[in-house]
Image: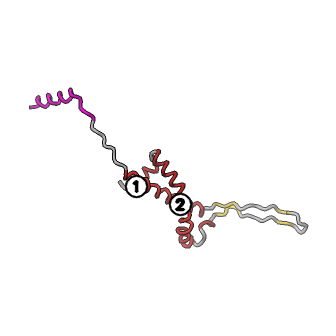
Amino acid sequence: MGMLKEFKEFAMKGNLIDMAVAFVMGGAFGSVSKSFIDGVVMPPISMLTGGDMGSMKLVLKKGVDAVIGADGVETTAAVTEVAIKYGDFISATINFIIVAFVMFLVIKGINATKKPVVEEAPATPANEVLLAEIRDLLKK
């Protein structure tokens, strides 16, 4: 089974213990991953895109500072900027993918150490065995 397919199955329907372990480990690993993303991964990406990823945004409405008249009275109120901050979103998405993949690898390693459960074949009732022998004798 391919690792990507196995990761998809894990992400979609993992059992309760796997999810609990992933949650605890993900919380602990989150700050390490964020530091790695912010300090190692994002600087080269920012360099390729031509600016700081955290400051990348699509401005929908520019902000305006308050205008204060000569008498010290505010004549025009300040307007805050309205923007879609897609740089932060991209950074958080990369961080999530790395944390999820590492947790998948941890769970996969834990599951590999578990012994597979061998199920015994159900015993065939004596009357069925006898009937099978009779059938076989009649075929001769």
* Residue 51 in the figure: left or right of residue 7: right
Which residue matches tag 1? Answer: 109
Amino acid type, callout 1: Gly
Q: Earlier in the sequence, mark 2 or mark 1?
A: 2
* Residue 54 in the figure: left or right of residue 77: left
Look at discs 2 and 1 and give the one toward the viewer: 1
Which residue: 24% across, 32% down?
Answer: 124
Which residue matches tag 2? Answer: 95
Q: Nearer the viewer, residue 63 or 119?
A: 119
Residue 5 vs 123, above or below: the answer is below
Label 2 crowd bin: few (<14), some (14–19), many (20+), radius 10 Å: many
Amino acid type, callout 2: Asn
* Residue 58 in the figure: left or right of residue 116: right
Q: Position of residue 80 (x, y in %)?
A: 74, 61
Q: Residue furthest top?
A: 127
**Circle 2: element type:** helix
Q: Nearer the viewer, residue 86 or 109?
A: 109
**Circle 1: element type:** helix
Q: Which residues are magenta?
A: 122-140
> Do the residues bearing badges 2 and 1 touch, measured as CB atoms within 8 Å?
no
Label 1 crowd bin: few (<14), some (14–19), many (20+), radius 10 Å: few
Number of numbered discs present? Answer: 2
Q: Position of residue 51 (x, y in %)?
A: 60, 71
User: Could you give the CA–CA distance between mark 2 and mark 1, rounded to whole angstroms?
Assistant: 21 Å
Q: Position of residue 111 (x, y in %)?
A: 39, 51
Report the predominant secondary structure element of the magenta stretch: helix
129 within the magenta span? yes
Q: Position of residue 63 (x, y in %)?
A: 73, 64
Please give the label number shown on residue 19: none
* Residue 16 in the figure: left or right of residue 2: right
